[in-house]
């Protein structure tokens, strides 16, 4: 975990990284995401067809894995003296490998930049979502957060 006392201290942790806990993406979560997003492709839901498909089983939606970033990275960067932290956006996302149903993933987050702005401190991070037992990650995302001081 990376800890700072206030948003003003964030430039001092540029270059540091932290690794989160493993988290399983099970078939029930994949099915719930399919319903919520109306994306019901067979590669996500049809276990029998997917077993003989290109991935050997059902896979999570890339956007499901991306949507889990707040959870996967939760607690990796702790900033004191904050009125609020806001997701400011993404500069880039690459889906590098599918996540099979039942796989465990975790986030590795590196603070890449911290620059003062009118509302507080804008922080750029690179988050890699690793798949347990795999050399290739599921995705790499360049995210931006805004930390507003109290």
Image (cartoon, rainbow, N blue to C red):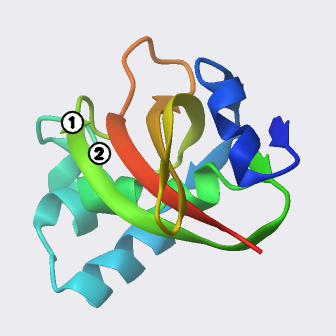
Q: Earlier in the sequence, mark 1 or mark 2?
A: 2
Total of numbered circles in the picture?
2
Q: Which of 52 and 128 is in front in this view?
A: 128
Rendered image: mark on residue 57? 2
Residue 25 appears in the figure: yes
The vertical placement of 102 against 133, above or below, is below
Residue drawn at x 57%, y 33% is 109
SS at mark 1 in the image: strand
Q: Left or right of 20: which side holds 65?
A: left
- Residue 128 position, x and y percent, is 45, 31
Viewer-side residue, 19 vs 88: 88
Task: Tell me if label 1 and label 2 are in contact, CB under 8 Å.
Answer: no
Q: In which quarter of the image is the N terminus?
A: top right
Quadrant in which residue 44 is drawn: bottom left
Residue at image point 25% right, 68% down: 45
The local secondary structure at tag 2 comes to loop
Disc 1 crowd, CA 10 A, few/some/many (<14, 14-19, 20+): some
Q: In this view, does 39 lie to the left or right of 87?
A: left
In this view, 2 is above or below 75: above
Name the residue located 52 percent from the left edge and 70 percent from the top edge: 86
Labelled disc at residue 94: 1
């Amino acid at each position: 975990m990376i800890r700072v006392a206030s948003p003003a201290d964030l430039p001092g942790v540029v270059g540091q990284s932290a690794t989160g806990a493993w988290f399983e993406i099970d078939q029930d979560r994949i099915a719930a995401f399919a319903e919520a997003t109306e994306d019901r492709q067979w590669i996500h839901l049809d276990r029998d067809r997917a077993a003989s498909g290109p991935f050997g089983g059902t896979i999570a939606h890339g956007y499901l894995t991306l949507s889990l970033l707040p959870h996967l990275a939760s607690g990796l960067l702790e900033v004191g003296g904050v009125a609020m932290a806001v997701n400011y956006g993404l500069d880039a996302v690459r889906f590098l490998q599918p996540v099979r149903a039942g796989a465990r993933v975790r986030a590795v987050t590196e603070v890449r930049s911290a620059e003062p702005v009118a509302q507080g401190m804008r922080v750029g991070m690179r988050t890699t979502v690793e798949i347990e037992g795999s050399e290739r990650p599921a995705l790499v995302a360049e995210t931006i957060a805004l930390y507003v001081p109290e």
